Amino acid sequence: MQKTYLWPSSELTSTPRHGDRPFEIVHIDHTQLDIELIDSRTGQNLGRPWVTFMVDAYSRRILAVYLTFDPPSYRSCMMILRECVRRHGRLPQSIVADGGKEFNSVYFESFLALKGCSLYKRPWSEPHYGSVCERLFDTANTTFVHNLIGNTQIMKNVRQVSKSVNPKELACWTLGSLYQALILWAYEVYDNTEHFTLGQTPKRAFDLGLIQGGIRPFKHISYDRNFLRDTLPSTQKETAKVQDMGVKINYIYYYCDAFRIDGVKGTEVPVRYDPFDMGQAYAFVKGEWTPCISQYRAIFAGRSEREVDLASKILRKRQQNSAKRYTITSSLLAGFLSSLEAEEALLLQRLHDMELKSILADINGQETDTSDSLNALKTDGDGEDSEDEENEEEDSEGEEAPDANVNKIVTDNGRTYTIYEDF
């Protein structure tokens, strides 16, 4: 007997499994792409990358893409949410994810609660609940990745692999170049290719869904410093105690002049840190977020949280094998990171982080108050852009002026739709 497709939470049981409109339900998931990549400077093989997709369930449109060498973590979730706001100026109403630990983190759940987003977990042993992302993974591999030099499709039959066809020997794509090609495929090619289930392109389904369901300008989120800071992680209790050396975050002390203010020392203050630059953190002192720096900033600056975690694991393992007991401190970490031993042990992670910088700059380096959803919608049928407001004013001479609450007038297949601000 076939099981009924219902969400675990009763809140969604009355909602179609793919929602009634764009941004109502989105899926986030990760997969490792079938391609080997190289370092952009040395040509050294760096392995296979991980991609994170955010897909709108209603239109199957890819809302955001993030590419990295690091396995799935809360950092991938952080960057995919940033990319969604950067491109569309808003976050979805509900997010569907699997049972991965990155989706169960306190950071991820608190951030979604802060922004008014609901999180739903897919049931175990029910793969059809994630069919939106799983089918996209297969499409991305078959129509894009498997057509690139260095793809690992041949590795399914290892006996056929020789040095001349080994993907590691043929690899020529870097992380940055693959990311640019991937977003071109996702945002242009896939977006304008007819979807078998929908009978139309994801972009067209998305645009028509906005017409029917409303753009909802009140959902707009500005992509500015405040939003970027809101996406940064914190400690487990989200605060840190101000001591003589500052606040302690992940073995590292951070200090700022605001800690000298009377009454601040000894108090618990909210803190945040950048997982891609451990040389700096932020503390909320006297109603204001203040940048704090580490006393070993010259060493920690530009180093990722993952690299520092790997270094601390090496030190803890060394401690277990030694009769001498010592505590891991920021000075001990800084000394180890400066040593030749760390350079050798953490070289691969350093190369991964250096390759990732171009992608981080692409996502973090642009602050904008505009969004795809608030831009003028374009028709897919005739490929012509909608007229500018100035031309519309010239053509409408002698006619009644539109109401003040009219947000947009869109023409599609000979029909005119009026979108009001109060959607």
Image (cartoon, rainbow, N blue to C red):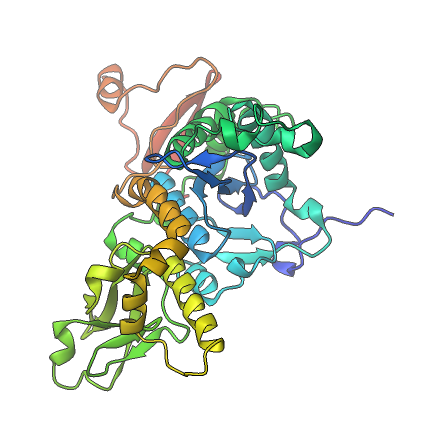
Q: Is residue 107 above or below residue 196?
A: below
Which residue is located at x 70 percent, y 45 percent?
Answer: 128
The answer to whether one can see residue 115 in this image is: yes
Q: Is residue 299 left or right of residue 125?
A: left
Percent position (x, y) of residue 278? 29, 61
Q: In the image as oriented, which residue stretches furthest toward the top?
A: 382
Q: In the image as oriented, which residue stretches furthest toward the right?
A: 1
Percent position (x, y) of residue 11? 61, 58
Q: Nearer the viewer, residue 298 or 341?
A: 341
Q: Nearer the viewer, residue 32 or 371?
A: 32
Q: Nearer the viewer, residue 58 or 236?
A: 236
In the rendered image, which quarter is residue 261 located in? bottom left
Q: Is residue 381 above or below residue 310?
A: above
The answer to whether one can see residue 157 in this image is: no
Quarter of the image that includes the C terminus: top left
Which residue is located at x 41 percent, y 70 percent?
Answer: 315
In the rendered image, which quarter is residue 342 located in? bottom left
Which residue is located at x 56 percent, y 38 percent?
Answer: 58
Q: Is residue 102 left or right of residue 375?
A: right
In the rendered image, which quarter is residue 245 located in? bottom left
Q: Nearer the viewer, residue 140 or 81?
A: 140
Percent position (x, y) of residue 238? 36, 73
Q: Is residue 151 above or below residue 220?
A: above
Say how many tags the image has. Answer: 0
Q: Is residue 214 left or right of residue 396?
A: right
Which residue is located at x 54 percent, y 25 percent?
Answer: 201
Percent position (x, y) of residue 150? 52, 28
